[in-house]
Structures are given as C-alpha cells and as structure tokens.
Amino acid sequence: MERTSGRTALRAQGRKAAAALGGQQSSGTRHPLVAVAMVLPLAIVLAVVFGGWEAVITQASSVVGMLGR
C-alpha cells in the first residue's frame, strides 16, 4: 500500500507542476492517430535499418485485422 500512495503523490505533484507552468492537464489518453504519428517514423527507420519490410507488412496487416473486428 505504501508504494501506491507514493506513486499517487508523485502524479499529483506532476499535475500541480504542469498546471503552474500553464500546461493543460492531461487525462492520460491520446487520440489513436496521434499515437500512430508518433510511432510510424521510428517503425520506418527500424524497418530500413534491419531490412524487415516483410515483418512490418505482416504486423501491420495483423493490426488492421484486429482493428477491423
């Protein structure tokens, strides 16, 4: 229980600091397109560096299949 209360206090402290700096308080979620925009450049670089286009295509098609359900 002690570990949980410590993390909660740290989160609250972080929120206070963000509010003091004029930042918007985050709800902890982000739009899926924002997440894709963040991950896609790194995925492309890794695919080029390691030559894994086939693996990237396979994983992408799996993700599309899961999202389509």
Image (cartoon, rainbow, N blue to C red):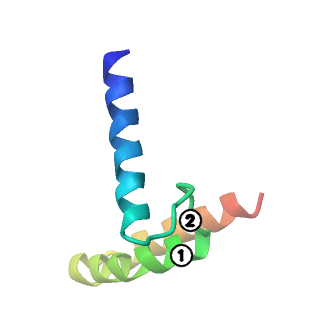
Q: Amino acid at mark 1?
A: Val
Residue 65 figure quarter? bottom right
Q: Amino acid at mark 2?
A: Arg
Q: Are there few (<14), some (14-19), or many (20+) residues within 10 Å of tag 1?
A: few
Q: Quarter of the image for the N terminus: give it.
A: top left
| Residue depicted at 43% across the width and 72% down the height | 22
Q: Quarter of the image for the C terminus: give it.
A: bottom right
Q: Residue furthest top?
A: 1
Q: Is residue 16 above or below residue 11?
A: below
Q: Which residue is mark 1?
A: 34
Taking the image as shown, residue 42 lies to the left or right of residue 35, namely left
Q: Is there CB contact under 8 Å for labels 2 and 1?
A: yes
Q: Residue furthest left?
A: 49
Viewer-closest of 67 and 31 = 31
Q: Which mark is residue 30?
A: 2
Q: Is residue 1 above or below residue 68?
A: above
Q: Residue 68 in the image: x percent, y percent?
A: 75, 64
For mark 2, give the secondary structure.
loop
Residue 30 figure quarter? bottom right
For mark 1, give the secondary structure.
helix
Q: CA distance from mark 2 to mark 1?
A: 7 Å
| Residue depicted at 28% across the width and 84% down the height | 48
Viewer-closest of 3 and 15 = 15
